[in-house]
Image (cartoon, rainbow, N blue to C red):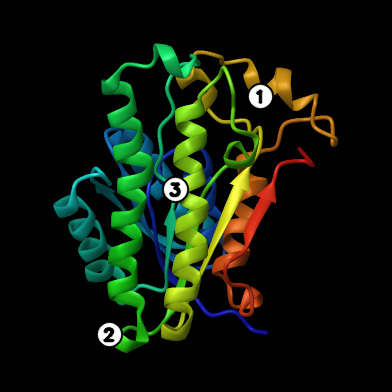
């Protein structure tokens, strides 16, 4: 099957997995809306990397937990590149490791607002724009879950694992709801991946340390996760819908 150039929006696209997805999309000649929350320098560097790879990109500031920001980032992507073909629902946060009994309300609200509400708002906006029933041309949504959804992350971040369990449910439900409207919805569940999210959790050496416990004997890379995400958005995966794809080295 010959793939066509696509226009996608990547939330949290300036760093880590989002950045790797944006650059790989650029290598395919795709156009990318690179959403970021606050680090404009990193976002602009990602945009330049997409251009260098052969694609087109713009940086779009916005908080996925704010409805007006979500609508604006979709508007900006379509204004720059035309109708959307896909969403990478990637933006997410994690907090320092702790037992649930020690987690303050502020931490829980921030994490759930970004990881759950933000993902649902972005998926809703993508559904409105991609649905063939609503005038769209169909397309794909790839949600970023985590193997934490099935491992639970006890004594580490049960709140994060809980939020990713919600993403799995969102994926399964939406794949059935939107499949008849030309939209495939899938999720990728990374394992221990070498990104700066571990530093955010207070354990910058976590990927190297825990990666050795995976059956493949190492941590994964953001680029390896990006390959799975782009495949799920690509025409090559045209009969894949409702999948929860683990990219976790066998964990």
Q: Which mark is residue 134?
A: 2
Category of crowding for the residue at label 3, using alpha-carbon neighbours closer than 10 angstroms: few (below 14), some (14–19), many (at least 20)? many
Q: Earlier along the polypeptide chain: callout 2 or callout 3?
A: 3
- Residue shown at 78% from the left, 30% from the top: 218
Query: Closer to the camera, 152 or 221?
Result: 152
Q: Residue furthest front?
A: 101
**Residue 79 coordinates in the image, percent (x, y):** 22, 69
SS at circle 3: loop
**Residue 50 coordinates in the image, percent (x, y):** 46, 53
**Please, is residue 146 above or below residue 234 in the view?**
above
Quadrant for the N terminus in the image:
bottom right
**Please, is residue 181 above or below residue 231 in the view?**
below
Camera-nearest label, 2 or 1 = 2
Q: Which residue is mark 3?
A: 90
Q: Is residue 134 visible?
A: yes
Query: Closer to the camera, 94 or 5?
Result: 94
Q: Which residue is mark 1?
A: 207
């Amino acid at each position: 099957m010959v793939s066509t150039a696509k226009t996608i929006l990547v939330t949290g696209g300036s760093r880590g997995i989002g950045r790797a997805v944006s650059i790989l999309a650029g290598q395919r000649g795709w156009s990318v809306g690179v959403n970021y929350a606050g680090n404009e320098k990193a976002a602009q560097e990602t945009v330049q990397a997409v251009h260098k790879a052969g694609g087109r990109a713009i940086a779009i500031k916005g908080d996925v937990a704010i409805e007006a920001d979500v609508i604006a980032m979709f508007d900006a992507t379509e204004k720059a590149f035309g109708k959307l073909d896909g969403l990478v629902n990637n933006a997410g946060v994690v907090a320092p490791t702790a037992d649930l009994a020690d987690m303050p309300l502020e931490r829980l609200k921030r994490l759930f607002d970004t990881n759950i509400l933000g993902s649902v708002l972005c998926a809703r906006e993508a559904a409105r724009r991609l649905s063939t029933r609503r005038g769209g041309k169909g397309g794909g949504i790839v949600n970023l879950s985590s193997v934490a959804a099935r491992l639970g992350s006890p004594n580490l971040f049960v709140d994060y694992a809980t939020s990713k369990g919600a993403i799995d449910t969102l994926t399964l439900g939406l794949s059935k709801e939107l499949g008849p409207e030309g939209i495939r919805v899938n999720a990728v569940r990374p394992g221990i991946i070498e990104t700066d999210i571990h530093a955010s959790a207070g354990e910058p050496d976590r990927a190297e340390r825990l990666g050795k416990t995976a059956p493949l004997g190492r941590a994964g890379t953001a680029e390896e996760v990006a390959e799975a995400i782009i495949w799920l958005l690509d025409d090559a995966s045209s009969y894949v819908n409702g999948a929860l794809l683990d990219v976790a080295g066998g964990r």
